[in-house]
Image (cartoon, coloured by chain):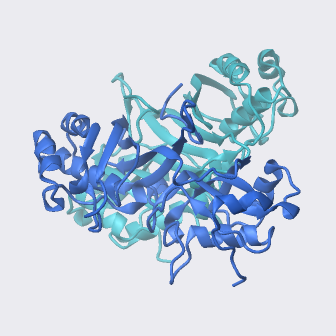
Chain colours: A blue, B cyan
Amino acid sequence: MPPRTRERPDEAAKDHVRLRMTVAYDGTGYVGWQLQPEGVSVQLKVEEALGRLFQPVPRVHSSSRTDTGVHALGMVVHFDVAKPQWRMEPRKLVLAANAHLPTDIRVMDAARVRPDFHARFDASGKQYRYTVWNESAENPLLRTQAWHFPRPLDLAAMRSAARALVGRHDFLAFSATPGYERLSTVRNVTRCDIQRSGSRLTFVIEADGFLYKMCRGIVGTLVQVGVGKIPPEAIVPMLAARDRRLAGMTAPALGLVLWKVYYRRKGRPATAVEVGGEVGDE
Amino acid sequence: MPPRTRERPDEAAKDHVRLRMTVAYDGTGYVGWQLQPEGVSVQLKVEEALGRLFQPVPRVHSSSRTDTGVHALGMVVHFDVAKPQWRMEPRKLVLAANAHLPTDIRVMDAARVRPDFHARFDASGKQYRYTVWNESAENPLLRTQAWHFPRPLDLAAMRSAARALVGRHDFLAFSATPGYERLSTVRNVTRCDIQRSGSRLTFVIEADGFLYKMCRGIVGTLVQVGVGKIPPEAIVPMLAARDRRLAGMTAPALGLVLWKVYYRRKGRPATAVEVGGEVGDE
């Protein structure tokens, strides 16, 4: 492995150009976004591709750390390149990076940003989407991108429960991991919709931030509401109890897509890094 | 290969049970539905799976013959089984067949039907859907199920052209192959919509029947309308001219899905073998 740049303080970055990219990937074959001691991560592939264009290999900072098997259409990342090396249009960077990436990872767009932009710390919100295929037989066209759930689901009950999740709540009960003891587990969920198109359910979940596996905890719980195992009115006491054992199961990774990341800087209105659009918005 | 049953006249079928199945498949790895001298077809895999359940191996008759790389969610087929061998519930047939099929082919449902039902000759209409990903970079989640078309498209012009295709017309200009000299090339297109969701376009095309590569000819032509190469008002004279060279290109196979097949028998209302539902219908 070639040597990597170390993260340096923003003050020292004046000899560098900071670039932002939106990255989409089919997470099926990866151990998630982040570099791991074992296995191939999306970050590794993106850094390797950028290493074919810039030296030393840029360290890529992401807005989110998607898990093994989770997909993305709108992952936002940033990285720095030494000024003397920056000779291309951002549009050319997209083409050049994609030429060195496998077909299951694509750079969707790129832009030069201010040297203090940070993909993670500047994010003001994120939207995830989760797909469930709700029919007795699997849909072969969705077999790597949807949770196949064969039992009938009560959509009205699920939507009622979803509404109870919207707002500023402590979501500890919906997160899979300990380690939050000293951090706030309060998040503001601004949207939790379930859209139906035939046998395909799309959960659209938007918040100012997400705890680890929170999205999948929400979907798993809503599906258990859908089969009658959890009543919709149990959601409010579930949030209050802050106990993971009271919420529902964690939905499998393959149905989840990091859809977009929102940024709002210095009083400007939020701007979405939009890739995929709404479900049936026209 | 074990011997196959020969198709016999329906009058002689009284010792047999006729079964109808809906089959879905990811066509990426197949030479199309139909058995071919070379390559693996979906029909081969379905007949092999049924051959694990019934002897002799049933010959499967399909509503349609999808091309190499074309997908299906609602392919309808029928086949016969000797009465002494028919001991299972249709629901069990779905599970048993799927246990012997690869994961990119699924039997969605099965039913016993009257011995004179014919998947192809009784079909009263079909719906195809075609997906275009219209952004400069490819969508890795759609890379085997959408035509990546990076140039901007004029959706209003495309929709205007699409409306001109609806109705009973001679579609010879939109079909790829000769051989129709002695057959009617008139078809009744009952629906030709383009739905947009972000950068994803879905063409919904419904007709009482389709000529060979007609759907892909329609989509290719509409996309050429979208880039300004063909004006929308050229569609009507194009139909009248009956000349393939005047219509647009044939869109690639990977974006096409046989969505559903309609049946109407003996004055009963049409019933859809519904699998996937509408785009954003709720």
One can see residue B122 in this view: no
Residue B45 relative to residue B181: left or right: left
For this orientation, the residue located farthest to the front is A11
Instruction: Name the spot of residue A102 as percent of width and height, x first.
Output: 68, 67
Q: Is residue A75 above or below residue B195?
A: below
One can see residue B96 in this view: yes
**Front in this rendered view, residue A237 or B31:** A237
Q: How many marks?
A: 0
Q: Is residue A38 above or below residue A118?
A: below
At 81% from the left edge and 25% from the top edge, which residue is drawn?
Answer: B242
**Front in this rendered view, residue A265 or B106:** A265
At 67% from the left edge and 70% from the top edge, which residue is drawn?
Answer: A47
Residue B93 relative to residue B251: left or right: left
**Front in this rendered view, residue B234 or A161:** A161
Q: Quadrant of the C terminus of chain A?
A: top right
Name which quarter of the figure residue A44 lies in: bottom right
Instruction: Name the spot of residue A68 as percent of width and height, x first.
Output: 45, 68
Q: Quadrant of the N terminus of chain A?
A: bottom right
Instruction: Name the spot of residue B75 as percent of width and height, x first.
Output: 47, 47
At 12% from the left edge and 46% from the top edge, which residue is drawn?
Answer: A228
Name which quarter of the figure residue B162 lies in: top right
Instruction: Name the spot of residue A135 as percent of width and height, x first.
Output: 31, 49
Residue B224 relative to residue B109: left or right: right
**Front in this rendered view, residue A275 or B115:** A275
